[in-house]
Amino acid sequence: MISLQFITHQTDKYSYLESARMALEGGCKWIQLRMKEAPLDEVEAVALQLKPMCRDHEAILVLDDHVELAKKLEVDGVHLGKTDMPVAEARQLLGEAFIIGGTANTFEDVEMHYRAGADYVGIGPFRFTTTKKNLSPVLGLEGYASILSDMEKAGIKLPVVAIGGITYEDIPAILETGVNGIALSGTILNAENPVAETRRILNNN
Ligand SMILES: Cc1ncc(COP(=O)(O)OP(=O)(O)O)c(N)n1
Ligand SMILES: Cc1ncsc1CCOP(=O)(O)O
Ligand SMILES: [Mg+2]
């Protein structure tokens, strides 16, 4: 079964919490609570509801961006990008027990996160997506192959999660490049039945 990280999103049909609930029901064991434009108190309110749901499903819960909140709520970790708190600073604040992920679009980004002590890197985008604004350049399969080859040459062993516009059909070829996991949002939430789609993705990969 693949390592699948579900990225929460709010749609016309689903709230952030409902999106996570469906992924958990479909068997996903890793949820990232990403509420991009929401005020901190709203993120906290949803995280407080989501934490016991993740615990009941034996799933990991990481927060996008919010290091102090992750510490306060004692969730499992955070995911940090270029404009967020640097990974090294987050590590100082959170200690070794928390999972810290960093965003990368180039080998240099990976190297930086590796040196700073990240536990994994989210490399993307694989292709264009409307789920995130201000996207970095699209990587495609060649981009992953190239970054993973550079990592190998440099002796950098760090779990890689591919992200950005990924669909069910893309997953086998992306995994072939050597990435360790896949992060998905839209392809699950746009499916007719997101619970069944999560199951299909997990059972066939
Ligand atoms: C697994 C994973 N990879 C990359 C990202 C992107 O994070 P970031 O660059 O901080 O952008 P925002 O998600 O905060 O808009 C991610 N969230 N998760
Ligand atoms: C958070 C994030 N970072 C790069 S692409 C992306 C969005 C992923 O969502 P989707 O699977 O809907 O493209
Ligand atoms: Mg961020």
Image: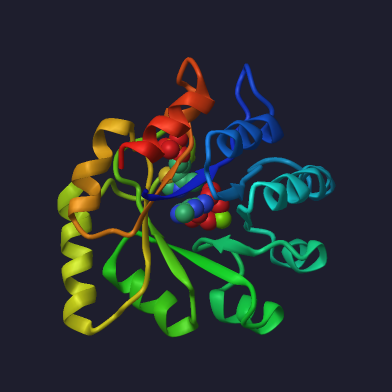
Residue 74, percent across and down?
Answer: 77, 65
Position of the C terminus by quadrant: top left
Question: Between 16 and 180, which is closer to the camera in this rendering?
Answer: 180
Query: Is residue 130 among the parts visible in the rendering?
Result: no
Q: Residue at x 63, y 17 (%)?
A: 13
Vertical comparison of 112 with 120: above or below: below
Query: Is residue 176 among the parts visible in the rendering?
Result: yes
Vertical comparison of 45 with 21: above or below: below
Residue 5, percent across and down?
Answer: 49, 49
Judged left or right of residue 195, residue 91 is right
Residue 12, percent across and down?
Answer: 62, 17
Q: Using the rendered view, name the quadrant where residue 37 is placed.
A: top right
Question: Between 36 and 177, which is closer to the camera in this rendering?
Answer: 177
Vertical comparison of 19 with 106: above or below: above
Judged left or right of residue 162, residue 195 is right
Q: Residue at x 35, y 47 (%)?
A: 125
Residue 204, percent across and down?
Answer: 31, 37
Q: Using the rendered view, name the quadrant where residue 96 is placed.
A: bottom right
| Rendered-image quarter of ligand 3 | bottom right
Question: Between 136 and 201, which is closer to the camera in this rendering?
Answer: 201
Q: Residue at x 40, y 40 (%)?
A: 202
Question: Between 38 and 93, which is closer to the camera in this rendering?
Answer: 93
